[in-house]
Structure formats: C-alpha cells, structure tokens
Image (tube, rainbow, N blue to C red):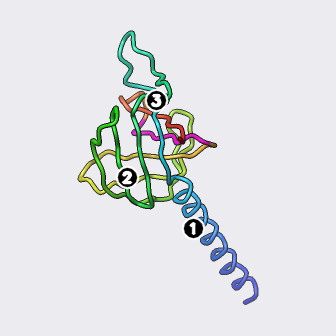
Amino acid sequence: MQNHLKSIICILLLSLIACDKAENFENNIDGTWELRHVKGIQIAGMSPDFPPGNGYIIKIDGNTYQRFHKGAAVSSGTFAVIKTELEIDGIKFPFKLDFDQATDTDVYAKISGKKLILSIGSMASDGTTSTYERL
C-alpha cells in the first residue's frame, strides 16, 4: 500500500512539473520577436540572415499573436501550447504551437535565451527553421 501511494505521489509531481514547464514557456514567449535567420528554403544568392530592423515581426500576448512583414500586419489569431518532445534536424523542440487557422502545418517551438526557434519540419522534406530574437 505504501509503495502504491509513493507511485501516485511521483506521478502527481511529474504532472505538476510538466504543467510548470508549459506555463513557463507560455510566460516566456510573450513579447515582440524579430526574424534573424531562416534555415531551409534558401533562395540562391540570398543570405539566410536578417539584420536588426528588417520588419519581420511576431508579437505574442498570452495566446494571441500578430505577424508583421516590413511593418504591415499580415495575420493574427490565437494558438495553444502543447507539450511535446520532438527532435528536428538535431534541435529538440519541447512544444508544439496549435494555431487557430485550419492548417495541416505543425509548428514546433523552443526558447533559448533571447531566441525563439520555430520549425515546420525537417529540411530533408522541405521544412524550415526560423530563429527570432526578442526585441
């Protein structure tokens, strides 16, 4: 009976830790992010790097987002954060962003320091990984 109780307590603690991780991510993702680098889908002769002030922005507040291209709003909506464990092109993504739009595209996310890394699949299958920097 005591071992059974210990097992239940361990499961509850692990669940709380997983919830805390998702909550921390949701709190850390809030803010304004500007595109700095795109890996995959390169155009010949163009740099995959984007300088500060390029205008490719994502603004996130809670579960809402707005995307801007060169200062013009191009999309907005809501999303949910789903905990996952997926490795794409050598990067471990702990979260999936489930956007409100009807789309088959899975977006995986990771925050590393002041960088938000978003991936829509492996480069081997025409996916891309975009790195944004917090402004």
- For the record, the magenta segment spans 114-121
- Provide residue 67's location: percent of width, then percent of height: 35, 43
Which mark identifies residue 65? 2
Q: Earlier in the sequence, mark 1 or mark 3?
A: 1
Q: Is 17 left or right of 65, judged from the image as shown?
A: right
Identify the secondary structure beneath mark 1: helix
Secondary structure at badge 3 equals loop
Q: Nearer the viewer, residue 13 or 135?
A: 135
Q: Give the residue drawn at x 39%, y 9%.
A: 45
Crowd around label 1: few <14 · some 14–19 · many ≥20 (10 Å): few
- Above or below residue 74? Residue 37 is above
Location of mark 1 (residue): 19
Which residue is the site of mark 3? Answer: 53
Residue at x 35% of width, y 49% of height: 66
Q: Amino acid at mark 2?
A: Tyr
Asked whether the beta carbons under mark 1 and mark 2 sit within 8 Å of each other, the answer is no
- Taking the view exactly as shown, the residue that stands out farthest to the bottom is 1
